[in-house]
Image (cartoon, coloured by chain):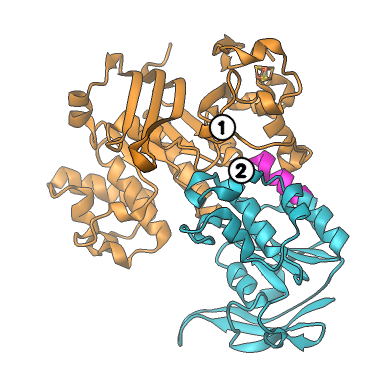
Amino acid sequence: MERKKILEIKNMNISFCQYQKGMRQEELPVIRDLSLSVHEGEMVAVVGSSGSGKSLLAHGVMGILPYNASMGGEILYRGEPLTEKRIRKLRGKEIVMVPQSTSYLDPLMKVGTQICKGKKDLVRQKKLDQIFSRYSLAKEVQEQYPFELSGGMTRRVMISTAMIENPRLVIADEPTPGLHQKAAKSAMEHFRELADMGAGVLIITHDLELALETADRVLVFYAGYTLEDAKTEDFCKEETLRHPYTKALWRAIPKNGFQYIDGVQPYVKDMPSGCPFAPRCSRCSEKCHGEIPYREVNGGYVRCVYDS
Amino acid sequence: MILEAKNISFRYGENGREILKDFSLKADSSERVGLAAPSGFGKTTLCKILSGYEKPDRGQVLLDGKPLEQYGSYCPVQLIWQHPEQAVNPRLRMKSVLEEGDQVDPALVERLGIEKDWLNRFPVEISGGEMQRFCIARAMGKRTRFLLADEISTMLDLITQSQIWHFLIEETRRRQMGMIVVSHSPELLERICTRVIDLQKTQS
Ligand code: SF4
């Protein structure tokens, strides 16, 4: 049976409006033509380098973009457009976001009350106890305040906050920066569990190696564009990957050879026309400087004039 | 040159846990020594002590037999931090960030792939990978003899990570600079280092 699509994003664009000196206005496109879908029980990772603006994707879906950002394209949730009104109703309930920063917890509210959002009936209490034992959080923690928690506990508390609502869609924005490797791994495993319980999970991260350990699919984000959408298995060897950049990433993994290519990801202001990877690509030709379509190839997608 | 940590102990606060106990390490300038250990093992603290940012409760750090603090205003052991954005002044243009280093060679700046155009930008106008290149250049000034790298590539994409390490290996070899490398990834240490020390074994 086909698993149901929980989230579908079609041709999303997000740009920032930046005021320069002298009131000159500048549009900075941060996300361009992004399309993806997340099914029930599926964990999808969007991987791109830090500071590339990919977290705006999460903010865009949640309807919490900053005032100077604008968004285009289409977002469908369970087949219906996710309008502003609809996301406001579902946010924090069916659709939850797990932020990276601990500052999202209310410092003045006890952990238990906070997770249950004040509604502490018997059913909720029982569920909370279950979630806590699953994440090895002692019952006493419910009576503590956020400042009393260690970093690892805080993260588990934030995930508990998401879980109490039986979310159908979980979006985690860079859940692991600055975390120690062990903590980062266990954070990812918690999200994996949510997916295994049936939720759709979208993770936005910079850590490809970690994403490959837990996610079902990986989208490779580069200079604002998604260059490839691949199954995790496709990363087992270079030949099954589609885009020259993804292949170069693969070869740069220490255990795959630790090779590198020259150059840097272009900064938004210095974007070449056509393929964003063209300045670093050994296969670049005339036709790469025009519009490059995002095409389905071998059960995945690629934004390149070649199939592989 | 030889960098030596002699019987170093360190704990945070009066009654805190002792994170380092009688730790000793000796490395010479031809070496790239990897430090492997699980988190919570005081690797970052050790880096701070080795580069003079933190004083140990007991023990000493010596460079060629002379205590590190006797080297005057410029510490020949330079630390590169994990998060470059926390290691630069957000109000300085990148060229001024570079000038904080010790007469950094312009040729080195070029070899690191730093583009002229970035020099006039502020930290928010460049990516994390670009900023880390600046931090590395700044640490490799004229009088630097040892480099300490504390998880410097975890935030970078894999290609940038590989680029930067290839550069560092070549440059430290050329200048006879020693290097101490901290990373959580055994495969990465394997690629970079001339030897790897498992802290768990030395400290338990
Ligand atoms: S479109 Fe052309 S330049 Fe871009 S990745 Fe493909 S071959 Fe290379």
Q: Residue at x 68, y 39 (%)?
A: B159
Is the CB–ligand 1 distance for label 2 below 8 Å?
A: no
The chain ID associated with circle 1 is: A
- Residue B21 visible in the displayed image: yes
Rendering quarter of residue A109: bottom left
- Quadrant of ligand 1: it is top right
Chain A, which colour? orange
In the rendered image, the vertical position of residue A26 relative to residue B176, given as above or below: above
Q: Which mark is residue A270?
A: 1
Q: Position of residue B144 (x, y in %)?
A: 75, 70
Type of amino acid under label 2:
Asp
- Viewport quadrant of the N terminus of chain A: top left
Check disc 1: other Cα within 10 Å, few if <14, some if 14-19, many if 20+.
few
Chain B, which colour? cyan
- Viewport quadrant of the C terminus of chain A: top right
State how far apart marks 1 and 2 are (Cα). Answer: 10 Å
Q: Is residue B163 magenta?
A: yes
Indicate the secondary structure of the residue bearing disc 2: helix
Give the left or right position of residue A168, taking residue A32 as reference: left
- Between residue A60 and residue A111, name the one nearer to us: A60
Q: Position of residue A104 (x, y in %)?
A: 29, 51
Type of amino acid under label 1:
Asp
Q: Residue at x 51, y 51 (%)?
A: B123
Check disc 2: other Cα within 10 Å, few if <14, some if 14-19, many if 20+.
few
Report the magenta residues as a range.
B156-166
- Between residue A241 and residue B100, name the one nearer to us: B100
In the rendered image, the vertical position of residue A184 relative to residue B60, given as above or below: above
Identify the residue position indicated by label 2 in the image.
B117
Asked if disc 1 and disc 2 are in contact, CB closer than 8 Å, the reply is yes
